[in-house]
Amino acid sequence: MAVALNHDQLKRLRHVFEEALSVPSDRRLAFIQYASDGDELVQTEVLSLIEAHDKSEGYFEQLSEDLIVPALLATEIDAGDDAPLSGLVLSRYEVLERIAGGGMGVVFKARDTQLGRTVALKFLPRRHALNPGARAQLIAEARSASRLDHPNIGVVYEIGEA
C-alpha cells in the first residue's frame, strides 16, 4: 500500500534526490539519511528513485539530450529572429516593429495603410514557415479567434500569406 507524502516531505524528497545524484555512490546512503532529517519515508522514496535512476543507465539523460533539449531550443526565438520584416510593406500593412515572439508565432506592430489603423500581425517563425502542421495550427487559431467577440480579445481581420 502506497503512503502519500505531505507537501513538506515532497519538497524534501525532491531536494534530497537532486543533491544525492551529485554525491559519490559510496557516500550516498549516509548523505540521504542525514539530508532526509530522519524521515524514513523520504529516505525510502529517495533510495527507490536513486535505484531507478541508476538502472536507467543514462536513458533519461539521453532522452533529454535527444528530445527535450532540441524541443526547448526550437521554442526559443532570438529577439532578432524576424527583425528584417520591420519597415517592409506586406500587402496593405507596413510592418513597424516586433512586439513579441514565442514557440509558434512572432507578432509585429503594423499600420494598415488603407484604413490608417494600427494592427498586430502574427507570423509563423521562419523555422516553421514551411511546416504544413504549424501553418494549419496558426490558421485554426485565427479562425477560432475570429468567432470570439469580447473587448479583451483582438479582432481577426484577415488571414493571408506573405
Image (tube, rainbow, N blue to C red):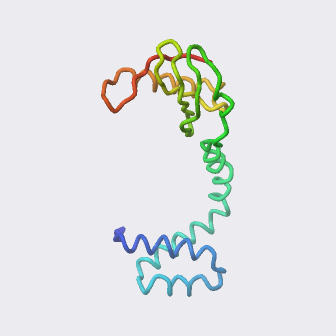
Q: Nearer the viewer, residue 55 or 5?
A: 5
Q: Quadrant of residue 143?
A: top left
Left/right of residue 1 with respect to residue 102 in the rendered view? left
- Identify whether 58 is placed above or below 128: below
Residue in view at x 63 percent, y 27 percent: 131
> Which residue in the rendered view is the most extreme toward the left?
150
Q: Position of residue 15 (x, y in %)?
A: 50, 73
- The mark total stands at 0
Tell me where residue 94 appears, x and y as whole percent: 58, 21
Identified at 41% across, 70% down, the residue is 10
Q: Looking at the image, which is closer to me, 97 or 39?
A: 97
Quarter of the image for the C terminus: give it. top right
Outermost residue on the front side: it is 116
Horizontal side of 86 relative to 1 (left or right) equals right
**Nearer-the-camera pick, 128 or 112:** 112
Q: Residue at x 64, y 26 (%)?
A: 87
In front: 69, or 5? 69
Where's residue 55, x and y in %? 62, 66
Q: Is residue 48 above or below residue 60?
A: below
Q: Is residue 39 above or below residue 101?
A: below
